[in-house]
């Protein structure tokens, strides 16, 4: 047996040398270390991460092991249980009290694959262990029913204390509500903006979402009534901007990003996702063809000083999977799955940083 002293105090002292890479503070001060158990030449403890999708999970684990071996003794057996508790700034929120983070997925124009990105990010976050939901806020052109293979499914409607409630459907582990569940697939929705806004509000107030770590809002293209309804109805944790590399898409994405940064809106922008970044043929997975240009998403992120969360390739499997009602990551399409998983981890990372460093988002009061 070694001549060192093993105690809970010495373990905490050793782990105080481990810095959380994103928050730049030690994991003891951040109260991430729980349930320390000691036996002869062995220590067990739990590290509570800020998200199950943490991309630095193994980095933190290795730093903890090294800290124990360096500051207490090299022969100690270290057993670490890595778990998570998703952070939030929405405590005591009157609307959607069980939802920790509301994230708007936006774009300046249509056709950039925003709904495809939303669907695959949601499933990627779910596969990491998070509780995830989607609101399809594109009232006039809902696409989530098709992408999730749920065109013929309707949410359950029931009464609670005289109030009508909707139960979101669940596909691939993700809770979903969409106007597409409430109207026939071939029926056009011809509404004024105020009616569309009320429909979105009902998805918040009249639905039983339960406990969620992340609720992704698939926004319609542009900057209009639905965007204002969203930020006036609930405090939004943050927004991400989806674009393609070409100039015309970037011009519109710039407007969409700038909208969230207007003083009267003031929603944090978590980052940019560049979709259709390059074409990769299935038979040549190592080849990249920049059909729509190169580097546009990077330029947009640098211009506004926000992270580039991911670059999603243009591969046939993404389109085929979406048309078949099975988002690409749900079927393990190899090239796409890696890209979407990395983007989801980067998003979760930025949500945790935002919650640790920025004030709570306020519900917008716009005349």
Image (spheres, rainbow, N blue to C red):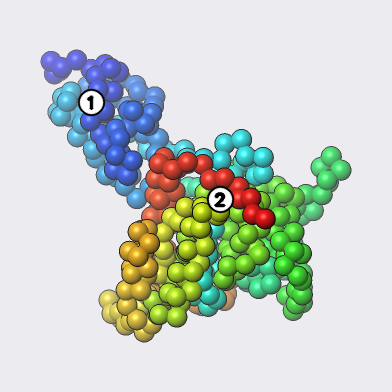
State the CA–CA distance, disc 1 to disc 2: 38 Å
- Judged left or right of residue 145, residue 29 is left
Q: Quadrant of the N terminus?
A: top left
In this image, 336 relative to 224: left or right?
Answer: left
Residue marked by disc 2: 236
Residue 261 image position (x, y, % from top left): 48, 57
Residue 97 lies in quadrant: top right
Q: Is residue 341 above or below residue 209?
A: below
Residue under the image location 40 percent in, 35 percent down: 48
* Mark identifier at residue 57: none
Quadrant including the C terminus: bottom right
Residue drawn at the location 54% of the way across and 58% of the way down: 104
Q: Which of the marked residues, 1 or 2, is nearer the chain's N terminus?
A: 1
Answer few, some or many: residues within 10 Å of disc 2's Cα (few below 14, many 20 plus, some between 14 and 19): many
Residue 103 seen anywhere in this rendered image of the structure: no
Q: Residue at x 78, y 49 (%)?
A: 165
Q: Residues within 10 Å of mark 1 (few under 14, many from 20)?
A: many
Q: In the figure, 171 relative to 93: above or below?
A: below
Element marked by disc 1: helix
Q: Which residue is mark 1?
A: 14
Disc number lying in front (1 or 2): 2
Residue 317 image-quadrant placement: bottom left
């Amino acid at each position: 047996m070694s001549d060192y002293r093993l105690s809970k105090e010495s373990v905490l002292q050793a782990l105080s040398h481990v810095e959380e890479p994103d928050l730049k503070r030690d994991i003891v001060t951040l109260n991430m270390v729980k349930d320390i158990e000691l036996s002869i030449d062995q220590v067990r403890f739990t590290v509570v991460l800020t998200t199950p999708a943490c991309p630095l999970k193994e980095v933190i684990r290795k730093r903890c092991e090294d800290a124990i071996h360096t500051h207490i003794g090299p022969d100690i057996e270290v057993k670490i249980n890595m778990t998570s508790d998703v952070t939030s700034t929405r405590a005591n929120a009157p609307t959607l009290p069980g939802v920790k983070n509301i994230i708007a997925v936006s774009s300046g124009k249509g056709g950039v694959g925003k709904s495809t990105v939303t669907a695959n990010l949601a499933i990627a976050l779910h596969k990491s262990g998070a509780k995830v939901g989607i609101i399809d806020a594109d009232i006039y052109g809902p696409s989530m029913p098709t992408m999730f293979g749920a065109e013929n499914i309707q949410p359950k409607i029931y009464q609670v204390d005289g109030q009508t409630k909707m139960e979101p459907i669940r596909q691939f582990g993700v809770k979903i509500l969409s106007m597409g569940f409430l109207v026939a697939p071939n029926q056009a929705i011809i509404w004024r903006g105020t009616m569309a806004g009320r429909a979105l509000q009902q998805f918040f107030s009249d639905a039983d979402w339960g406990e969620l770590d992340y609720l992704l809002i698939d926004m319609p293209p542009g900057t209009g009534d639905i965007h204002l309804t969203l930020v006036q109805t609930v405090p939004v944790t943050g927004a991400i901007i989806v674009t393609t590399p070409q100039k015309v898409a970037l011009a519109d994405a710039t407007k969409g990003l700038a909208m969230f940064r207007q003083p009267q809106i003031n929603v944090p922008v978590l980052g940019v996702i560049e979709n259709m970044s390059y074409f990769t043929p299935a038979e040549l997975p190592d080849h990249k063809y920049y059909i729509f240009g190169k580097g546009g998403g990077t330029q947009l992120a640098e211009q506004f000083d926000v992270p580039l969360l991911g670059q999603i390739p243009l591969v046939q499997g993404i389109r085929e999977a979406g048309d078949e009602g099975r988002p690409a990551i749900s079927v393990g399409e190899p090239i796409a799955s890696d890209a979407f998983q990395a983007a989801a981890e980067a998003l979760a990372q930025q949500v945790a940083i935002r919650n640790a460093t920025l004030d709570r988002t306020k519900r917008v009061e716009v005349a």
